[in-house]
Image: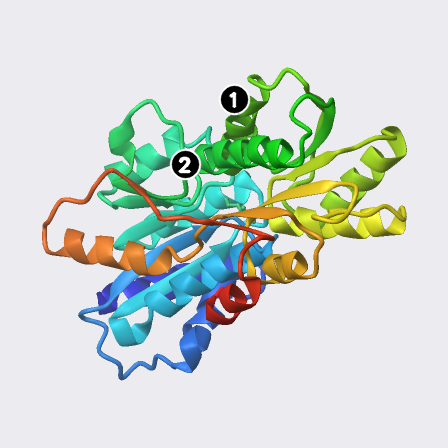
Amino acid sequence: MKQKLVCIFFIFLLLCSVKGCAMPDYISDKDKLNGSTLTDNDNFDNFIVVGYSQVGSESDWRSTNTDSFKQALTPQNNYYLIYEDAQQKQENQLKSVRNFILQEVDYIVLDPVVETGWDTVLSEAKAAGIPVIIVDRQVVVEDEDLYTCWIGSNFKKQSIKAGKWLENYLKKKGRSDEKINIVTIQGIPDSTAQIGRTNGFKKILSKNKNWNMLEYQNGEFTQAKGQEVMEYYLDTYEDIDVVVSENDNMTFGALKAIEAAQKTCGPDGDIIIISFDAVHAALQFMLDGKINVDFECNPMLGPIVKENIERLEKGKAVKKKQYVDEKYFDSTMDLEKILSERTY
Ligand code: AHR
């Protein structure tokens, strides 16, 4: 293993001298991991080297998700984590995975920004004998043996629950037969989170003939883009009853746009807000009466990946698809208590 780390270092010295580039993130991350410093005197023999290609840092959910890996795969736990932020670009992820292969890491953890386009690079990892663990979003590949397992959320189920929640909510308000105008702020197209959340809600939408989906627009999972899309919706449509926002950060942007347009939202307002992720800041907005309901997306995948690697290290099998547990929160619940107990 020590040889491998020395090799990593020399490959990057070489890359830097060829490209004249700055030192890559993960070389300096070596010294940043939980404040612990690796030195030449450390014994690397038992370290498990993990190359982790993360989607980006576009949302609160994403930051918590990254932290869960950095806190689980630590030098203290005998891991050396090489972290790469792809800035929501598949081309960056393809480069990272290829670099991980060159570095002969022990495992690759890939959170794929989109579902398609992975067959070649995953075949290269397989040919190099490196197990690949897919997390959060999924890949669609010809040969399912190209990766070891996938761990993440059931995005479709989250939004089926969202649609059913809306059916119930409107029923309680005596609005089941009213025409309900809906807009959707979508996540990055072709990402599992977008596909699942759009399609799950569509399932319930198709059963409610009085629900009118006015438009779908891409808000890229970011607050800035969510705000831009919501501004456009408010300029374009006079009567919006429901906003389905496919993540919390786009919802934060939408709330700003709604406020600027002097409209109201939440349980006592004009517009019903349905959101996904259920991060701390969103539940605070719910407590403040701005969001009606939020469907949790569990970001704590790092410790589950660690458990899987430990099984694999012992030669044990792991389940191919592993869904994490998820809840939902709405304004009828004891949000103060929930917020005080919630770790993310
Ligand atoms: O893939 C998970 C989604 O991606 C989360 O809902 C979102 O916040 C993130 O950007």
Q: Nearer the viewer, residue 41 or 16?
A: 41
Picture residue at 56% right of the left edge, 48% below the top: 294
Give the number of the mark in front: 1 or 2.
Answer: 1
The residue singled out by tag 1 in the image is 203
Q: Secondary structure at mark 2?
A: loop
Of labels 1 and 2, earlier in sequence is: 2
Mark 1: give few (<14), some (14-19) or many (20+) Cα within 10 Å.
Answer: some
- The alpha-carbon separation of the residues under discs 1 and 2 comes to 21 Å
Q: Which residue is mark 2?
A: 138
Instruction: Tell me which corner region of the image, top left, top right, bottom left or bottom right, holds residue 50.
Output: bottom left
Residue beneath the point at 41% across and 66% down: 70
| Residue in the picture at 41% in, 50% down | 99
Q: Position of residue 113 (x, y in %)?
A: 51, 40
User: Does 108 appear above or below 285?
Assistant: above
Instruction: Report the side of 242 relative to 48 (left or right).
Output: right
Name, please, the residue furthest toward the left.
Answer: 315
Residue 281 can be seen in this image = yes
Q: How is the image coloured?
A: rainbow
Q: Position of residue 104 (x, y in %)?
A: 29, 53
For ligand 1, tell me if the residue under mark 2 lies within 8 Å: no
Residue occupying the point 46% across, 28% down:
116
Choose top left, top right, bottom left or bottom right for residue 41: bottom left
| Residue 282 placement, left or right of 10 | right
Question: Which corner quadrant holds the N terminus?
Answer: bottom left
Type of amino acid at the residue the image marks with label 1: Lys
In this orientation, does residue 14 appear?
no
Q: Secondary structure at mark 1?
A: helix
